[in-house]
Structure formats: C-alpha cells, structure tokens
Amino acid sequence: MFDGITGKILTVKAPLIKESFSQTEKAVLDFLNERDPISNHRFRELVWTKSFDEYLKFIESNIPSLLLQMTTRCNLNCDYCVYSGNYAHMESHGSKDMPFETVIKSIDFFVEHNKSCKDAEISFYGGETLLCFREIQRAVVYAREKFTDKKPIFRVTTNGVLLNCDVADWLNANKDVITTVTLNGPYQDIHRKTASGEGSLTHIMANLRSIRSKYPELWNERIHFIANITKVSELEALRSFYTNEVGKSPSIITHIRGQDGNDFIQDMICDEDYDREKERFSIEYCESGDAFLNAYFGISVNAVENRLIKDNDGIGIIGSCLPFTEKLYVHADGRFGICETSCDKMIVGDLQNGFDLDMLESIYNKAYALFNASCRECWAKNLCTVCFKDVLDTDGSFLNEIPPPFCRSSRKYALEQLKIYCTLKKKEAQSK
C-alpha cells in the first residue's frame, strides 16, 4: 500500500487480506486509521523547497553544471529530434554556432556561480556537438585554467558520425572528458538519417569499432550510450544489437517524447502492445536483474528508492527543478534557457545582463499556482516526472492546467514503478 502524501510503502499482512480487493482495501484503511492515522486527504499546500530569496541566493554560487549549445547545426536529420520541426515547443535546427567569445563568457559566468559547489561539470551539446570540435578543445583547456580549486568534468553528446581518429585520439588523451553517443541499433537507420536520406549506422559503427580496438580503456570507461525507442517491443532487437555488436549496455533507454509532438510523432509512438510488452520485460527484469533492462527500468526503480518520505503535515514539495538549480543552459547566442528540452521561447537571462530576476520570480509564482491547482489531490504527486517542459505553451507561457493526458500517463507510470520496486524488494527480502 502506497501513501501518496507521506511516501510510505506499507506491507499488508495475511489477517487483513479479504476475498475481494475492495474489502481488503477497506480493512487496511480501517486498521491504519484505528492505530496510526494516515493521510487520506489531499495536500493542504505544495511548496518549493526554498523561498524565492533563498532560491536567488542559492543560484549565486551553487549551480552544479554548465550546458553549452555549441551549434544549432546537425549532420543528421532525425525525425524524432526535438529540433526536427515536429515539436511545437522547440525551434528547428539552424545554422548558428556559438562564437568562442560566448563560450569564454559562459565559462567565466559559470565559474563565478559554481563557487560553493564541490564539483563542476561542463557539457557540450548541439545540434551535433562535434561540428565544433576545435572550439570544444579550446574550451576544455580554458575551463581547466579558470577552475583553480577543483577539476571539472566534461561531457560531449554526439550522434557518433564525427567520432573519427582525431577525435578518438583527443578523447583518449583527455581522461576528464566523457562521451555519450545516441545509438538505436536496428532502428537507427529508420529515424536517424543523413540530410540526403541515407542511413547512419554503418558509418557510426565503423567509428566505434575503431575506438574499441585502439583504445579499450576509453571504450570501457568513458564511452557511454543512450538508446531511444518508439515501442516497448523494440527492446528485444535492441538488446541483441547491444549484446552482439556493441558489447555493453546503454546507460539509459528512453521513449521518444510525445508531448507537443505533431501527428507524425503521435503515429510513430503509438504502441498498442505497450501494457503486455512492458509487463513481460518487467517480469524478466525483476527475475534476472538484466543489465540491459536496467538501462530501461533502473532509473524508475531508483526514483522510488530515493522518493521523498515525510511526516503527514499536509505540506507537499514541488518536485520540478527551478531554472539553474541543476544546470546553466546557454543557447548558441548567449541567452539562458531553462534547459535543453524546455520551450526555446522561455528565456531567463543572458550573458550580458545575467539572470532575469523578474522572469525568475514570475516562473516561481506561476508554477506554484499551477502545481497547487493541479496536483494536490493526486496520489502520484511525489513520483511524478512533471517539469517545465510539460507545462509550457508553444509561446513559452504557462498552460492553464497540466494536460490531462500527461497526468494519466504519469499516474500509470508511477504505478508501474511501484509494482517493480515492491517486487524487487520482496525478492531481496526472501534472499536474506
């Protein structure tokens, strides 16, 4: 039994189990209310973890990471990319590269606003990041010089087309740089094509085999993978590909995003066998702990493991992250966005003027009002993945309500998370 307000999971013992679910549910609730009252009402209020003044003080020196949009160009034409033109909230790929002067200013700004953090991370993003490889090399050298009290970690996100010998040599020599490649295996050439419509898999795999052969330590430790799927049934062929062709599992497997996607995207992700296939793979995952399936299920299991557990004081915590609390996202032109997946039209500052405090206060208050109006009665509130990308309109303004289809999907996902988590916990207890 999951208590949506306190976050507690309670085990039902045999004496309370009746012939029907409704009878069992009533017996459990009666038992709990008699002995240890539980939360059977909505939250009185949802609050941010920090007051607005505390939030402003936090982002002055506690921003943990910097994400630079090095270019809006790309050498692939992936039909499900958020910059493909198939999503209403994001601008399409363009032709702008981040000037190196903007890179320098971004790093300088980040250094000043990272001072209270133990660690620092700088990520290079696109478009296709490696189209600006020389600028990335220069940026890494500059950032190392600017951080005198800590050693930053660097991350490069790429489609793998430009992972040539020169890039591989540099990655091998720079052990503080981690590379993440998006690789969809047997489904790669369906969705991730060149501008001329050709498949990309053969070329990318040649690059990866070269790295694996020449630099095994780099391959094993600092080359990571993300895989995207449109349907759960694709997991089987994807697992075979990663097992036989790549030799290791991806770090994460994600579904193609549907929110704000056009009819083409909605048709792509339509999955009539979702429930049956998800159940089949979840049973296998719980029984085997398969490393590949962990890339698909592991994040959701960890989310339940690390869920907020609190007393029943009627106060809930807004789980979405406020701008800059997790990263500073800088567009190629030097403007600050909320993040790389939120509406491009929501701008919260720039390198010349710093944070837009009026915009930040507006976001703080409008999100507070929206979440309190929409989420206080939802049992899945503390497991929900809702964030700004889900509540912004195509012009960057806040929606009047969280879209009901998102809420239904989120509750369904939360229930799946809880079932898998409790199954794993039961198995763990039985093995002791």
Image: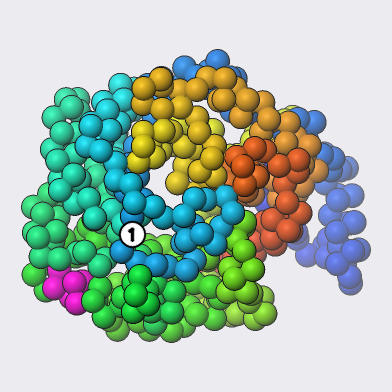
Residue appearing at x 25%, y 67% in the figure? 161
Q: Position of residue 393 (x, y in %)?
A: 65, 45
The vertical placement of 247 against 260, above or below, is: below
Q: Position of residue 252 (x, y in %)?
A: 42, 62
Whether residue 228 appears in this view of the structure is yes
Give the structural element (helix, strand or loop) at label 1. loop
Whether residue 217 appears in this view of the structure is no
- Magenta stretch prevailing secondary structure: helix
Tell me which corner region of the image, top left, top right, bottom left or bottom right, holds residue 283: bottom right
Residue appearing at x 13%, y 61% in the figure? 168
Q: Position of residue 100 (x, y in %)?
A: 22, 37
Q: Position of residue 18 (x, y in %)?
A: 87, 67
Residue 368 part of the magenta segment:
no
Q: Local crowd at mark 1 within 10 Å, few (<14), some, or many (≥20)?
A: many
Residue appearing at x 89%, y 49% in the figure? 30
Stretch in magenta: 206-212
Q: Is 407 left or right of 31, judged from the image as shown?
A: left
Q: How many marks?
A: 1
Tell me the quarter of the image containing the N terminus: bottom right
Tell me which corner region of the image, top left, top right, bottom left or bottom right, holds residue 63: top left
Colouring rule applied to residues: rainbow
Identity of the amino acid at label 1? Cys
Q: Is 308 left or right of 403, judged from the image as shown?
A: left
Q: Which residue is mark 1?
A: 74
Residue appearing at x 54%, y 33% in the figure? 322
The vertical placement of 356 against 304, above or below, is: above
Q: Is 293 left or right of 260, judged from the image as shown?
A: left
The vertical placement of 279 against 374, above or below, is: below
Tell me which corner region of the image, top left, top right, bottom left or bottom right, holds residue 199: bottom left
